[in-house]
Amino acid sequence: MQPSEIRDALLAPQADALFAEARTLRDSVFGREVFQRGVVEFTNHCRKNCHYCGLRNANTALQRFRLDADAILQAARTAVELGMGTVVLQSGEEETIAIRPIGYLIGQIKQMGAISITLSLGDHDEDAYRYWHDCGADRYLLKMETFNPELHARLRPGQSVRERLNRVEMLCRIGYETGSGIITGLPGMTTDILAEDLRLLSGLPLDMIAVGPFIPHPQTPLKEAAPGLMEESLRATALLRLMNPAANIPATSALDALSAHGREQGLNAGANVVMPSVTPEPVRAGYNIYPGKNAAPEPVRLIVGRLQQRLRDAGYEPSSSRGESPVRKTGC
Ligand code: 5AD
Ligand code: SF4
């Protein structure tokens, strides 16, 4: 799609036809199966200071946690028992990343069944990325957040679009199924910037693409900013589906933070993946990236069971398959 077409679709008075077209395309590639990825958030320590994120280093009000190997493996086992075909290991960026222990976890989790492993651990050296891939990690998620150089530099102190992009391309070259994504409605993000972000994302060799709305966190510099709009994030999801028919696109949990049936709306806009947290109850609330994230003080099995029922009620089938993108994007 041309940038002007993307912009027009974001601004059009009505989006029903856009959502219907995205849904039809999603159905033709994936049917009504929704891939489930269980996310183990094993530490909320982070060395970075992204302005939008509750885990930022400067947030001294946050109680920090780090799960030990046994707790991480137990959470992964729970995910597999709950029918997830993928386990995602996610964390803030530790000051010194435990490269070998993470490799050990990857090996152990791979033995739990026919499951894929996704890593979402932020910026690290090529050696670490290669090592984890050799250990059996299948996928890596590294979000661009925005491709706009000024906005990126302002909201992600000390970081640049170029550097982040280099890493995304490096992950792809190493052989990971690579994922990236953006946040919609970031303070300072215009419709033109969003349209350009959607175009650039779609030009990358990505197997997974995520988009979710900005939600202001009270312990960040953006606490007074307005949240992203649900509608805009849904339109962005639909446009990504139209431009990337075979990509795995999650209905992000940030949608649920804005609306009770946010994830169903994401699916109805063309998404085909859900990524529930399977982080154990005593610490899960500490993975507080934005208000509402991991907020329910309930056991994981109950929360995931309820999500699976919601999917069925909305006419979808929670799938336990590994959920690879049916067409690998080439060109990295
Ligand atoms: N609102 C929405 N999404 C956010 N993220 C971080 N902070 C926020 C926020 N305030 C997303 C980013 C990041 C991931 C950890 O969560 O996309 O990659
Ligand atoms: Fe750390 Fe990621 Fe949050 Fe940035 S977005 S502060 S890198 S956890």
Image (spheres, rainbow, N blue to C red):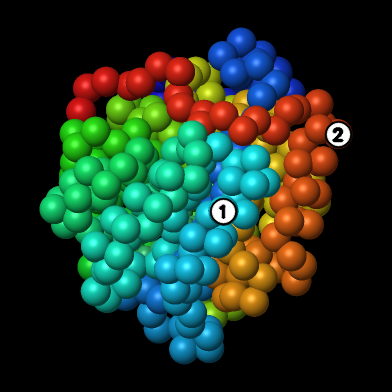
Q: Is residue 152 above or below residue 34?
A: below
- Between marks 2 and 1 in the image, the one whose residue lies nearer the viewer: 1
Taking the spot 61% from the left edge, 10% from the top edge, the residue there is 28
Q: Is residue 274 above or below residue 107?
A: above
- The number of numbered badges drawn on the structure is 2
Q: Is residue 237 visible?
A: no
At 29% from the left edge and 36% from the top edge, which residue is drawn? 176
Residue identifier under label 1: 77
- Residue 112 in the image: x percent, y percent? 49, 45
Pointers 2 and 1 in contact (C-beta within 8 Å): no
Which disc, if any, is residue 251? none
Ligand 1 closer than 8 Å to label 1 CB: no
Residue 322 drawn above or below residue 188 = above
According to the picture, the residue beneath numbered tag 2 turns out to be 313
Q: Position of residue 20 (x, y in %)?
A: 70, 18
Secondary structure category for the residue under label 2: helix
The type of residue carrying mark 1 is Arg
Image-quadrant location for residue 105: bottom left
Depth check: 201 or 15 in front? 201
Residue at 67 percent of width and 37 percent of height: 266
